[in-house]
Image (cartoon, rainbow, N blue to C red):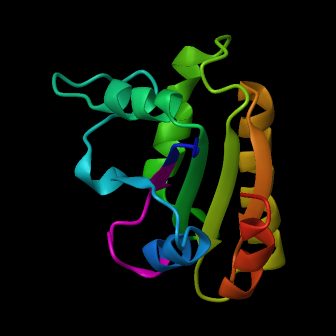
Amino acid sequence: MSKKILVINASPNRNGNTAHFVQTLLAGRHYETLNLVDYHFGGLGQVFAEDDFEEIYQAMVSADVLVFGSPMYWHTFAGPLKVLLDRIYVHEGTDDLAGKDLFFIIQGTAPSHESIASTDFIISRFAQIYGLNYKGKANYLSEIKALQAKL
């Protein structure tokens, strides 16, 4: 039985470099993608009349493997991913995400060592709090093979 893989793409460009990195990582595997640009959800404390957060969250809960993908903007990941992580806080204390594997793709033009370390810390801390198995990150296409071995 194959694992259900869900990609959360935080890029405003559905078919950009982030999507290309994910396609390379998951070559030959079946997966679903949620492009956050297609959803409407507010930050923590904001719930809009037409808020798609629970739809996104339930898709995450039903997956076995999560892949977060984002371009690097202003030395961190894209805002929609940050908003999503903030909103998930309403489910803190549950084990909804526990045991799932988590991979992180963060790509951009010449990210600094500090930027990479900061984003990696945030994602690894998120994984720790919610019981996910953080398998690692890739900032460059050359790092994809190491992640593929962990799928």
Residue at the image position 66 percent from the left and 85 percent from the top: 141
**Residue 4, percent across and down?**
52, 43
Q: Is residue 14 magenta?
A: yes
Q: Which residues are magenta?
A: 6-17
Give the camera-side residue of 126 and 135: 135
In the picture provided, is 5 more to the left or to the right than 94? left
Q: Is residue 13 magenta?
A: yes
Residue at the image position 54 percent from the left and 62 percent from the top: 69
In the picture provided, is 3 more to the left or to the right than 43? right
Q: Quadrant of residue 151?
A: bottom right
On the rendered image, what quadrant is the N terminus found in? top right
Give the camera-side residue of 112 and 9: 9
Q: Quadrant of residue 128?
A: top right
Query: Where 12 falls versus 102 (above or below)?
Result: below
User: In the rendered picture of this protein, how many numbered marks are placed on residues?
Assistant: 0
Q: Do we see residue 72 in this rendering? A: no
Q: Residue furthest front?
A: 1
Residue at the image position 24 percent from the left and 52 percent from the top: 38
In the picture provided, is 18 more to the left or to the right than 105? left
In the picture provided, is 55 more to the left or to the right than 128? left
Query: Where 21 falls versus 12 (above or below)?
Result: below
**Residue 19, percent across and down?**
44, 72
**Residue 15, percent across and down?**
34, 76
Q: Residue furthest left?
A: 49
